[in-house]
Structure formats: C-alpha cells, structure tokens
C-alpha cells in the first residue's frame, strides 16, 4: 500500500505511483517508464489537499488518505486541473466530505461539472487570490491552456513551493520522489517527450506564463508537478529548459521519418542519409520507420530536429497510413522554425511526394526542396540521385 511521503514539516505527498501504465490519454501517449499521479497534503493551522489521482486508484487513494489525516479536518480542496488523471478520485472523496469547498478556476468548475455532473461547493479563484493557512498561505496563478482552459498553479508561501500540476511533469514512475535521486538521462528523456508531445502547441503561452511568474520574483525552493519527480535540486533548471523548448527548439539533428512496403523507400532513405552526411557532416541523422516505431518517440525526435524528411511510397494514389497518422499529429502540434522535404517510391501515378510536401507546408514546416521521387526499386543511378538530393538538403539547412 502506498503511504504518504514527507516532503517538509507541512507538506506530504499522498499520490500514486503507477508502475504498470504503458499508455496515457487512451492510446495517444506511450509511457514506457510508467507515471505517477501526485497529490499533496498541506498542513498548517488549516489543511488543504492539492489534486487527487486517476480514477482506477480512487479507493486506494481515499483509504490511504484516511490513514494520514481525518478527512473532516481537510479545510480546502484545490483542483489545479480537472483532467481525470488528477480529479478521478474526487467523486469518491466528496462522498466522504460532501460540503468541503473545492477551489479551482472558473473554467475548472465547468470542466469538473462537465465530467462529474455534481453540484459541489465550488469556489472560483483568480490569479492572486490567496488562502491563509496559518503562517503559510496558498496563492493561485491561473495558467489557461497550459494545457487546458482550467489549468492553474498554486504557490505556497513560507515553504516556497510551486505546485505546477502538469507543467514541468514527466510520465516517470519512481519511488525516489526527487529529481536529484533519479537517473538524469531517463528524467530528461521523459521531460522532453512530455513537452514535445503535449505542450508544443502552447509554446508562446509557456514563454509568457513563465516570464510572468519569474517577474513576481517569488522564491522557489521546490516545484511539485502532478506527474513524476519533484524538482528540489536547482528547481529552476526545468523552468530554463521549458524556456528553451518553447523557443522553436532544435538541436543539430535531422530526422528521416518514412514507411515502406517493399523497401524501395527505405533504400531511398538510407541513400539520402548518406548524402546529408556528406554535406552536413556534424549533424545527427536518425532514420525512423513510422510503421514500426512509437509515434511519440518519433515526435520527440522531430522536436529535437532542425529539419525532417518524410518518405512514403504511393499507395492507392496516396501515402501509407502510418505517415497519415504522423501528419495528423504534427498538424496539431504546430512546430516552428523547422525545415523539411519529402521523398518516396512509386509504380505508376506517384502522388505521395507531392501530397506529403503539401502536408508538411500545412503543418508549418519550411519546404527547402520539391522532393525526390523514384520509380519502383532504386537502381544505382536512382540511389545516386537520392544521395544528391540528400546533399542538396544538407546544404539548404
Ligand atoms: C496496394 C498497392 C497500391 C499501390 N498504389 C499505387 C498508386 O496508386 N500509384 C502508384 O504510383 N503506385 C502505387 N503502388 C506501387 C508502389 O508505389 C510501388 O510498388 C513502390 O515502389 C513501393 O515502394 P516501397 O518498396 O517503398 O513500398 C501501389 C502498390 C501497392 C502494393
Ligand atoms: Fe492534463
Ligand atoms: Fe496530468
């Protein structure tokens, strides 16, 4: 059974570590390292509970919480974000303490009512509103669209803790709780994947909100997100990362995303990579078969890239379905400042390259070449043409 973990004299973690989770948001987000739903209990003269856990763990959560605190002594329930992974245990908790006030944004009330259809004792809060807990207090900061209209942060004075909910979180199961205790490669791999796949569309809001909070000059000793580890060692390092990630982030990387039926397009991809390597020798080049690789891992690599190439043969006058799914995702994420081109094999009509180029442009990529097309399986000359195309692409960056 998951018992509470002490963070400070006044703050404890009362969440759930979900080691078994392999997908999140239905099947949209792979969670190779599990996740956690972080709920926090804050005790001063008054007691507040910040967020709960996902629905499947509601019973476990409420029964553990009862062993930690007399539920009737909870004065305030804070809902930073109404998504089910944080509010799922709320209905069961509210059965036990039905009259307790729930503090959330105006949009939070709408989301909670939209999900649970209950007339709970809602108290809408705005940026700057404060609850005095004793010598400490909770200050609310609205963060609309980071990543839902209802999202907000809660800052605890005295302890100098920012409860940031999904922002700065990672789908990362660990029993160790703190950023400095875990494997740093794993931690940052999960943090960048989370940003790339969930926060990319809101990058301009990320920059604005972070600067707004930094301008308040509040001391931040810890950032307690709603997934993954607590940032206690150099907590602002993840804030600095977010500022970099929000600013059309790119590394010296080129990712070639392709799919293939009979390996013609794969051979093209490999020859193109050779050409790029000749003209842009220092760039990291990665080939990813969209039909085989995890879609979120592909998106993370695209996020890190300065340019991408997308390849598919023509099938039924279109492109392959894994490439269609890839375009659906990147259209929504709206990356900025990245270059691109398309390539592919065909047998007779050969529409795929033109269609992919159009989709890349629509997704906000800058096309630097009209693309490369090969009929059937590439022979030596065709592979030379692919290498040429790769060299041209590398030079155009
Ligand atoms: C089911 C199927 C449908 C196809 N439809 C088209 C088509 O509409 N137009 C076209 O030019 N080629 C079409 N082709 C031919 C492929 O584009 C061609 O075989 C190509 O070389 C395959 O490349 P790959 O080895 O990368 O899969 C089709 C092939 C298959 C198997
Ligand atoms: Fe969320
Ligand atoms: Fe979440």
Image (cartoon, rainbow, N blue to C red):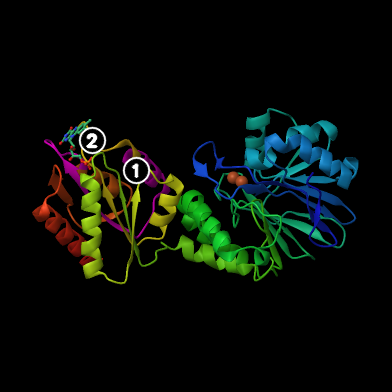
Q: Which residues are magenta?
A: 323-352
Q: Position of residue 36 (x, y in %)?
A: 66, 48
How far from the left and from the top, in percent, is residue 3?
A: 81, 48
Residue position marked by numbered label 1 in the rendering: 327
Q: Is residue 338 magenta?
A: yes
Residue under label 2, please give it.
318
The residue lying toward the viewer, choosing from 391 and 110, is 391
- Quarter location, residue 337: bottom left
The answer to whether residue 89 is seen in the rendering is no
Position in image of residue 99 (x %, y %): 84, 35
Q: Is residue 176 left or right of residue 185?
A: right
Is 186 or 336 nearer to us in this picture?
Answer: 186
Where, quadrant-wise, is the C terminus in this rendering? bottom left
Locate residue 62 relative to residue 303 in the image: left or right.
right
CB of residue at label 2: within 8 Å of ligand 1? yes
Q: Residues within 10 Å of mark 2 (few under 14, many from 20)?
A: some
Query: Residue 390, position in %: x, y?
Result: 20, 60
């Amino acid at each position: 059974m998951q018992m509470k973990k002490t963070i400070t004299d006044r703050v404890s973690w009362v969440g759930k570590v979900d080691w078994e989770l392999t997908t999140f948001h239905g099947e949209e987000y792979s969670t190779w390292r599990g996740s956690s739903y972080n709920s926090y209990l804050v005790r001063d003269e008054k007691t507040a509970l910040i967020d709960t856990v996902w629905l499947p763990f509601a019973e476990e959560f409420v029964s553990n919480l009862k062993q930690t605190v007399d539920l009737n002594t909870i004065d305030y329930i804070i809902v930073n974000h109404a998504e089910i992974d944080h509010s799922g245990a709320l209905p069961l908790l509210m059965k036990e303490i039905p009259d307790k006030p729930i503090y959330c944004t105006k949009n939070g009330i709408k989301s909670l009512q939209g999900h649970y259809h209950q007339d709970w004792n809602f108290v809408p809060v705005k940026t700057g509103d404060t609850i005095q807990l004793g010598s400490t207090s909770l200050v609310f900061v609205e963060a609309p669209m980071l990543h839902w209209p209802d999202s907000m942060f809660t800052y605890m004075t005295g302890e100098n803790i920012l409860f940031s909910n999904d922002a700065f979180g990672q789908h990362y199961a660990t029993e160790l709780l703190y950023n400095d205790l875990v494997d740093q490669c794993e931690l940052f791999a999960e943090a960048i994947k989370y940003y790339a796949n969930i926060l990319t569309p809101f990058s301009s809001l990320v920059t604005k909100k972070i600067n707004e909070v930094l301008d308040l000059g509040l001391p931040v000793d810890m950032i307690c997100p709603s997934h993954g580890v607590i940032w206690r060692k150099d907590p602002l390092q993840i804030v600095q990362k977010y500022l970099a990630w929000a600013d059309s982030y790119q590394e010296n990387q080129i990712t070639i995303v392709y799919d293939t039926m009979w390996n013609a397009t794969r051979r093209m991809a490999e020859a193109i990579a050779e050409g790029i390597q000749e003209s842009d020798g220092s760039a990291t080049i990665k080939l990813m078969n969209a039909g085989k690789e995890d879609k979120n891992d592909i998106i993370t690599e695209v996020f890190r890239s300065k340019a991408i190439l997308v390849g598919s043969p023509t099938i039924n006058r279109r492109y392959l379905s894994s490439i269609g799914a890839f375009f659906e995702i990147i259209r929504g994420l709206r990356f900025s400042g990245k270059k691109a081109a398309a390539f592919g094999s065909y047998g007779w009509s050969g529409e795929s390259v033109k269609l992919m180029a159009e989709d890349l442009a629509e997704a906000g990529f800058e096309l630097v070449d009209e693309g490369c097309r090969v009929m059937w399986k590439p022979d030596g000359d065709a592979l030379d043409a692919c290498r040429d195309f790769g060299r041209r692409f590398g030079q155009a960056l």
